[in-house]
Image (tube, rainbow, N blue to C red):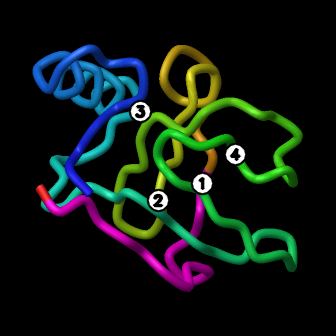
Amino acid sequence: MDFFVPSASDPQQAEAVFTSIAKHIQAPAQQQRVYKLEWRHEGKVCQCEIGKPLPAIFRNDETVLAIYDCGEVYKICTPNRGAIKFDPILASKSAVQHVEFFSH
């Protein structure tokens, strides 16, 4: 899967949005970009994917815009959770079961 950000009209805009969100949440430079993440949250297996809604456990059907590797945690960003306001959703690396990266 090639890198994209939902609603970006072209690769340049996708890059600008990804960089802007990263600055907002203080994410480090990304060696690889995460496309899909699976982890355990409150005893349940959760899966999120760029361009898809958050898992139902978060009671928010916002679209996942970006996922950042931030050392001990992954930060999952939606328009209101991380991208514009509020904090992103955190997935502890110790709870992560699967990570899939964009190919480019």
Image height of 17 relative to 50, above or below: above
| Numbered mark located on residue 74 in the image | 2
Asked whether, in this view, residue 6 is left or right of residue 101, the answer is right
Q: Is residue 98 magenta?
A: yes
Mark 3 lies on a secondary structure that is: helix
Label 3: how many Cα within 10 Å (few below 14, some 14–19, many 20+): many
Report which residue position mark 3 lands on: 25
Q: CA distance from mark 3 to mark 1?
A: 11 Å
**Precedes in sequence: disc 3 or disc 4:** 3
- For marks 2 and 3 on the same chain, the one whose residue lies earlier in the sequence: 3
Q: Which residue is mark 4?
A: 54
Q: Is label 4 in a helix, a strand or a loop?
A: loop
Q: Amino acid at mark 1?
A: Leu
Report the side of 90 relative to 68 (left or right): right
Give the number of the disc on residue 90: 1
Which of marks 2 and 4 precedes in the sequence? 4
Label 4: how many residues lie within 10 Å, few (<14), some (14-19) or many (20+)?
A: many
Extent of the magenta region: 90-103
Q: Amino acid at mark 2?
A: Tyr
